Image (cartoon, rainbow, N blue to C red):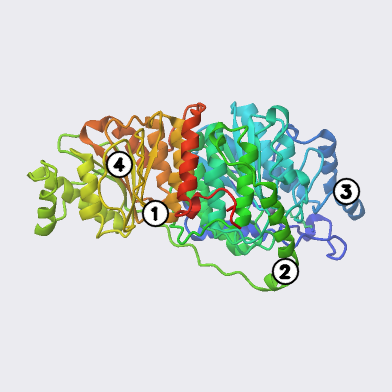
């Protein structure tokens, strides 16, 4: 984790700054870095990081993005008189030049490059650069919005030129549109730029028409620019997660980047005076996590904005803690995405679907009358908002301190037949909690023939112990090899799981009759297989059929992001049971990606059940459970048209019950 603390201006700089002479920025202040870094120190997170030394970017590196004349101009600022400095500053928008900012801006850009070097050479897996001034607004020949050099744009070009990265994904979760990044790569198909931003139908800074969702890139870059405008303030965790699941992640997986750069601005968090959003700091734990299985885990987060010192420090800690692999916080009571977010979601998906096969079946854009009605509504809102505005600015936002995220003493455990080898890193569970006669008799009564004998019961008692130890967070996750996986599932969810956890998310890969009642909501079963199950067994049993079978990577990814993850976030389980049916046909890479992504639920408490004769994939399973990044999926092939359509139709049918599945404005209102 690289950080470039830049010193505040001192008297001895030879230029006593009379406050009244030079306007100073009130929100982009040095304390942003010091409170963030102090929080990392206080929480012990900085000790767990490798510290990457900052450095100044060279001229050549700055010229990867900026013009000579711009760089020459900025170079002169340290020696300018106050008058010249003011004049130089006034030619740009919302930026403050200080004699020391050229030095700071070179440190910010150079630190980002140091982080890219460390990640691309494998010295570290991922990291975060705590830098200022920020970068994503600065353009080839202009400073803008507190930004002088475009740190992340330079980092992307540098990663390609020096480290041979072919495709770079830039995710900009700052609440402002990084127009500088968009302009830099809008005709470049090797850099995919995704940005959400407060827009309010162009009423919010930088008030650009090209920040809207229909700016998709130009020429060969068409489709490689994805803008998600927020037309209202107050967006929450569910709005952010919906956009990740239904827009960014499917596209990012199809793009298959070699490196992920994050314009990590935290003014999109609650409490920020610029963003005025309501997403809580722990959302960044999940946004980071959802990106960490891309590019083999190579992720560089570079600080952009974030002006509420409390939510900034908390959000930085949430991000770094996820980069370190700690369990994720449970995101409780997610609501439905709001109407405005759904309208943006629908518009983005409808323009992007012609460029991304994974979005091919996205619904059409909001029909004109719907969007016209919404604009009328928005105008009405505006009148109301004027008054609300001053009320809102008075009310101080409050939010709970993010919950502790404790790393369990044992990361991963295994329950194996005695003759099976235990993969490195996994702790074999041998001690088995005495199940007591009642449970033993219930297990013996299972339809399974071999549960009756000793080792059948022994296996289940170890399973019980494993679930118990996950519940108490002594163990993070685990894998069990059992003789009959279908019976084991039944036993776990009926006998063992039910009294240990309140809600169990059962993810079943492969065909098998899973016949148990799921009506009461204590269990949500999502089964992904090649079997076409026409009947729908109610809200809590969701069979997803992939016509080409589970080996169809695109179909599988669509099912994971379009259905499984949104459902999982809404259901908020206490335990995830991932079942690999024999002969499922799912590929090892996809399997590892699935395990990695499912860690977002239940504080990472995932129990994998596999059939003893399926032990071949024990290696990839163990690797994913231990937190090693999943290898990138091969280039995603274009899906057979019917799969996507079927999934979209299923989503539409289910969204009445499951709000997080929505991607369109409800035509009703
Ligand atoms: C890195 C960053 O995106 O957070 C910078 C935001 C700059 C905001 C400028 N506000 C201008 C208000 C004009 N009336
Ligand atoms: Zn910002």
Task: Say what secondary structure mark 4 lies in.
Answer: strand
In the image, 423 versus 212, the foreground residue is 212
Task: Say what secondary structure mark 3 lies in.
Answer: loop
Give the numbered dot on residue 91: 3
In the image, 159 versus 334, the foreground residue is 334
Give the numbered dot on residue 384: 2
User: Could you tell me which residue is drawn at 30 percent across and 32 percent down?
Assistant: 617
Of mark 3 and mark 1, the one earlier in the sequence is 3
Residue 622: x and y in percent read 32, 38
Q: Nearer the viewer, mark 3 or mark 4?
A: 4
Residue 136: x and y in percent read 70, 45
Of mark 4 and mark 2, the one earlier in the sequence is 2
Q: Nearer the viewer, mark 2 or mark 3?
A: 2
Q: Nearer the viewer, mark 1 or mark 2?
A: 2
Of mark 3 and mark 4, the one earlier in the sequence is 3
Of mark 1 and mark 2, the one earlier in the sequence is 2
Q: Is residue 177 left or right of residue 327?
A: right
Q: Where ligand 1 lies, by image quadrant?
A: bottom right
User: Could you tell me which residue is drawn at 71 percent across and 40 percent down?
Assistant: 215
- Residues packed near mark 3 inside 10 Å, few (<14), some (14 to 19) or many (20 plus): few
493 relative to 450, above or below? below
> Which residue, given by chain and number where applicable, does mark 1 sit on?
603
> Which residue, given by chain and number where applicable, does mark 4 sit on?
579
* Distance in Å between CA atoms under marks 4 and 2: 51 Å
Residue 333: x and y in percent read 46, 62
Q: Is residue 324 visible?
A: no
* Distance in Å between CA atoms under marks 4 and 1: 18 Å
| Residues under numbered marks 1 and 2 in contact, where contact means CB atoms less than 8 Å apart | no
Of mark 4 and mark 1, the one earlier in the sequence is 4
* Distance in Å between CA atoms under marks 1 and 2: 41 Å
């Amino acid at each position: 984790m690289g950080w470039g603390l830049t010193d505040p201006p001192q008297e001895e700089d030879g230029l006593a700054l009379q406050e009244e002479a030079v306007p100073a920025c009130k929100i982009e202040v040095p304390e942003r870095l010091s409170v963030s870094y102090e929080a990392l120190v206080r929480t012990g997170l900085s000790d767990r990081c490798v510290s990457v030394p900052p450095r100044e970017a060279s001229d050549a590196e700055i010229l990867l993005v900026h013009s000579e004349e711009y760089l020459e101009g900025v170079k002169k600022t340290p020696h300018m008189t106050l008058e010249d400095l003011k004049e130089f500053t006034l030619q740009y928008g919302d930026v403050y030049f200080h004699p020391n900012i050229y030095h700071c801006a070179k440190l910010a850009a150079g630190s980002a490059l140091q982080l890219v070097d460390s990640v691309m050479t494998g010295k570290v897996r991922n990291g975060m650069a705590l830098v200022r001034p920020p970068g994503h607004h600065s353009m080839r020949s202009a400073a803008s919005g507190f930004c002088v050099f475009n740190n992340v744009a330079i980092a992307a070009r540098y990663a390609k030129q020096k480290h041979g990265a072919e495709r770079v994904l830039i995710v900009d979760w700052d609440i402002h549109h990084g127009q500088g990044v968009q302009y830099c790569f809008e005709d470049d198909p090797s850099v995919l730029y995704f940005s959400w931003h407060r827009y309010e139908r162009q009423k919010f800074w930088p008030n650009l028409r090209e920040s809207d969702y229909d700016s998709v890139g130009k020429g060969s870059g068409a489709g490689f620019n994805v803008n998600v405008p927020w037309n209202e303030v107050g967006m929450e965790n569910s709005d952010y997660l919906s956009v990740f699941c239904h827009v960014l992640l499917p596209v990012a997986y199809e793009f298959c980047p070699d490196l992920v750069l994050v314009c990590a601005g935290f003014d999109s968090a609650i409490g920020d005076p610029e963003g005025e959003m309501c997403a809580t700091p722990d959302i960044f734990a999940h946004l980071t996590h959802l990106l960490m299985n891309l590019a083999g885990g190579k992720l560089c987060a570079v600080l952009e904005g974030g002006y509420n010192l409390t939510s900034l420090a908390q959000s930085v800690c949430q991000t770094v803690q996820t980069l370190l692999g700690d369990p994720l916080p449970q995101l409780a009571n997610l609501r439905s995405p709001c109407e405005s977010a759904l309208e943006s979601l629908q518009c983005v998906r409808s323009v992007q679907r012609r460029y991304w096969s994974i979005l091919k079946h996205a619904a059409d854009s909001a029909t004109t009358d719907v969007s016209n009605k919404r604009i009328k509504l928005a105008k009405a809102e505006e009148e109301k908002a004027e008054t609300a505005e001053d009320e809102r600015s008075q009310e101080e936002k409050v939010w709970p301190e993010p919950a502790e995220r404790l790393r369990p003493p044992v990361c991963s455990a295994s329950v194996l037949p005695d003759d099976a080898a235990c993969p490195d890193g996994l702790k074999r569970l041998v001690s088995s909690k005495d199940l007591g006669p009642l449970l033993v008799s219930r297990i013996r009564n299972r339809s399974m023939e071999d549960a009756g004998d000793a080792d059948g019961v022994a296996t289940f008692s170890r399973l019980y112990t494993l679930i118990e130890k996950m519940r108490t967070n002594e163990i993070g996750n685990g894998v069990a090899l059992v003789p009959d996986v279908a019976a084991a599932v039944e036993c776990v969810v009926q006998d063992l799981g039910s009294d240990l956890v309140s809600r169990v998310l059962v993810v079943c890969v492969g065909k098998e009759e899973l016949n148990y009642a799921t009506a009461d909501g204590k269990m949500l079963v999502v089964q992904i297989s090649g079997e076409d199950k026409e009947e729908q067994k109610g809200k809590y049993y969701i069979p997803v059929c992939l016509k080409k079978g589970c080996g169809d990577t695109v179909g599988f990814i669509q099912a994971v992001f379009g259905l499984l993850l949104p459902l999982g976030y809404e259901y908020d389980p206490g335990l995830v049971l991932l079942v690999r049916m024999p002969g499922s046909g799912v590929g090892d890479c996809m399997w590892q990606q699935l395990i990695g992504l499912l860690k977002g639920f239940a504080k990472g408490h995932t129990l994998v059940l596999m059939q003893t004769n399926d032990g071949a994939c024990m290696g990839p399973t163990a690797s994913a459970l231990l937190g090693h990044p999943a290898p990138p999926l091969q280039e995603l092939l274009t899906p057979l048209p019917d799969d996507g359509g079927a999934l979209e139709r299923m989503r539409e049918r289910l969204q009445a019950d499951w709000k997080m599945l929505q991607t369109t404005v409800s035509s009703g209102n």
